[in-house]
Image (cartoon, grey):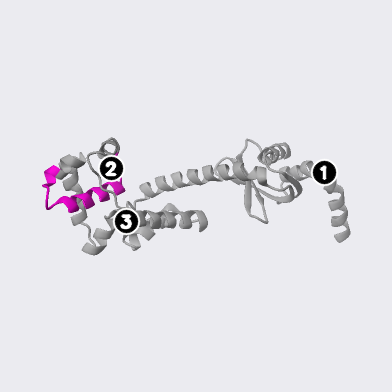
Amino acid sequence: MTKSITKEDSGEARNHRWGRDDVAASLVYLEKVRIDKSQRQAAAEMEIPRTTLQYWLKRKGSLAESPVVAAFFESPDGVAFLHQVVVAAQFVMTQIANGSARIVCLFLELSRLDKFVAGSYGVQHKVLVSMEKEIMAFGQEERCRLAPKMEPKAISIVEDETFHPDICLVGIEPISNFILLEQYAIQRDAKTWTDVVRVSLSDLPVRVFQVVSDEAKGQMGNFQRLCPRLKASYIQVINRLC
């Protein structure tokens, strides 16, 4: 959406670091009034330092792209579209396809979008860390919102342990692929597993009837604690199959 910065609404923008949408809107407004007002007058009206405005104009003119492409990506609509494309690429490559920040950097370089958005590893890594925090916050909000509406059900849990570098206990419901828990722990014994699982399920109306894992003693002990009634019957079935 095109925004014209005027003296009335520029005060707030002056007090924070200029964003790409602010820059684009300022350049659009400057283009509209360039016949009637000098650059100095326009800068004073928008309450932007003239040297800052000149830097923005110089940067736009130095972009190694066609004038049409540069004009689009430096416009408010172009900035919004660029933001949408880059965020979608970051999300799909790192959260869906398990890629890294370097993959995003390579995409930006090959697509030449790094002419318009910072494509360095440091910048992209910082953005992706922020994205992961937002995803986690959204997940927690949705869990709080939907858990009270959930119908009671029996579930299985697939458990495993990772080390990066501390012990992290992970549990997933296999049908929905929903991550029930990701919890760092000092130990990985049966009691720790049981305590962590019970806390992670405390807000959900579920009953665990099956725990699937490798043959780690802690996870097997967790299964026995969570599903004591099933232990004997499973042993009978296994003995019969053997």
**Residue 212 in view, yes or no:** no
Q: Earlier in the sequence, mark 2 or mark 1?
A: 2
Closer mark to the observer between disc 2 and disc 3: 3
Say if 211 sits above or below 110 in the image.
above
Q: Is residue 127 magenta?
A: no
Residue named by callout 3: 77
Give the residue displayed 87% in from the left and 51% down from the top.
233
- Give, as a three-letter code, the residue at label 1: Pro
2 left or right of 229 in image: left
Marks 2 and 1, how far apart in space?
61 Å
Residue named by callout 2: 18
Q: Quadrant of residue 187?
A: top right
Say which element carries label 3: helix
Residue named by callout 1: 228
Q: Quadrant of residue 186?
A: top right
151 left or right of 25 in image: right
Q: Is residue 22 magenta?
A: yes
